[in-house]
Amino acid sequence: MIPRPRKMKLTEGTAPSEVPVKERLCPQLGVEEYRIYISPKQILIDGSGKTGFFYARTTLEQLRMIYGEDLPCMEIEDGPAYSYRSFQIDCARHYFSVDELKKMIRMSAEFKLNHFHWHISDDQGWRIESKCYPRLHEIGSVRAGDHFGNYHSDQKSGGYYTRDEVKDIVDYCKELGIEVVPEIDMPGHVTAILAAYPNLSCLGQPVEVGMKAGIFKELFCAGREETFTFIEKLLDDLMDLFPGKYFHIGGDEAPKERWNGCENCQKRMKEEGLKNAQELQGYFCNRIASYLQSKGRIPIVWNEAVYGGNLDKGVVVQLWTEDKDNQIQAHLYKGGTAILAMVENCYCDYPYGMHSLKDMYDLETAPAEFGEHGEASVLGMECLVWTEFIRDNERLEELCWPRFAALAEVGWCKKECLGYEDFRERLTKLFALFEKYGVHATKLEGWDPDDETAAKQTEEFQMNFSKEDREEARRAQNDI
């Protein structure tokens, strides 16, 4: 079974397929905990509510896939090691239908992932119908072409989710024990928003929705008060659609060239006593985070937002890239918390030859960047797929599955995992689950490519980036 139950004991006898399955409410159990007692006369499930019962039934489904309809008698006690076990899908770079998202969500629920990080805004697209700022979906959801990597098209590309569709997805997730965590990236990755509302940038000049990958210069202007008025009103609109407690506000890859040359931003820095643009980003994120907290939400940011050293400890940091000057450790030491999402272990948009199934399973849950007290600060982990180079459903599914399942087990079991080979053997037995739910998962021979295949896949992937692209990214990274 995946995730492997934390306690399982075989008992005597067999439970025929016709035995009844009964549920027993046990309020003393945690929300995600469950117990299963399989006997010759009945299957009894204990849980404290809907989520626990659902998880128990997914475990029964996997047991029947392994043993058939007649099950060996056993007792299972199960519950997660981490409360935050997430999967992310980037719908900003390429739009995916509601049906495809539901397929991905249902498959994730089968492996007991409990948060859907929905990336719905970036330089290349805004994807949600906005009641208060309709130009976002009217203008920001459409780009003039696609020029990602080696793919080039001058056909318009776009799409957005209506408010009813968003509510449908949120409700669907709730039935499966999943909270939707929306992400509106800021202060960078906002070109699609600025295409609709250019007055919110430092230059105030018209821009086009992005058509290629990369790190863009344009940011929200941190010196204009109207920027914060706009964001707060937008967040109010979105919080009506997303009732969960977590809200992601980005904070990654925000080069400071525009801020450093902006009179309004420099004035803001002087007024607030900020020494540099990194501290200005901390100020920016703290203002947005404080507004979300006033509404009862928990803000999440990417780890570059800590580089200024002044991020509020109540903001959750998602670690994906390198630390600077031990700022992540300092944030955790003052009481902050973190989500693990390191590129080499969690990013599923890379080919398996670069990030193998084993790499995903070998995620270090106590990274050195966190220091001696860091492990206790970890809320959980997340598997991610960015879609600059993914344009169809089948490719999306092949890249995510079964790698999402590996992270799901690590998040559920932590150090109690029995090792990769044991996981791989169980996954092989359960591969029919993907077929059952119509998911085009990568087959066994593709999970851990040999050196020759890995080298070929790496070379092909790297061809998406020209020499000029790499140099531009290097310069931008130095300015973050």
Image (cartoon, rainbow, N blue to C red):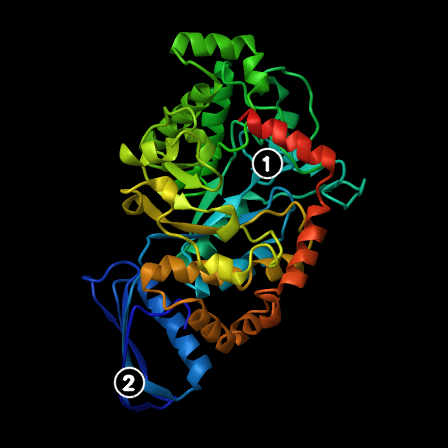
Q: State the image coordinates of residue 326 (x, y, percent, origin top left).
A: 38, 32
**Helix or strand or loop: what does disc 2 sit on?**
loop
The residue at which mark 1 appears reads as 122
Relative to 303, say whether 98 is above or below. below
Which quarter of the rendering shows the N terminus? bottom left
Q: Residue at x 58, y 12 (%)?
A: 261
Distance Cα–Cα, label 2 vs label 1: 51 Å
Left or right: 401 with respect to 295?
A: right
Instruction: Please name whichever residue, 457 or 349, is drawn nearer the observer in this view of the structure.
Output: 457
The residue at which mark 2 appears reads as 42
Instruction: Please name whichever residue, 254 or 130, is drawn nearer the observer in this view of the structure.
Output: 254
Visible in this render: residue 428? Answer: yes
Q: State the image coordinates of residue 354 (x, y, percent, origin top left).
A: 59, 54
Q: Is the residue marked by circle 1 packed among few (<14), some (14-19), or many (20+) residues within 10 Å?
A: many
Left or right: 92 with respect to 420?
A: right
Instruction: Please name whichever residue, 172 or 453, is drawn nearer the observer in this view of the structure.
Output: 453
Farthest residue toward the front? 451
Farthest residue toward the right? 154
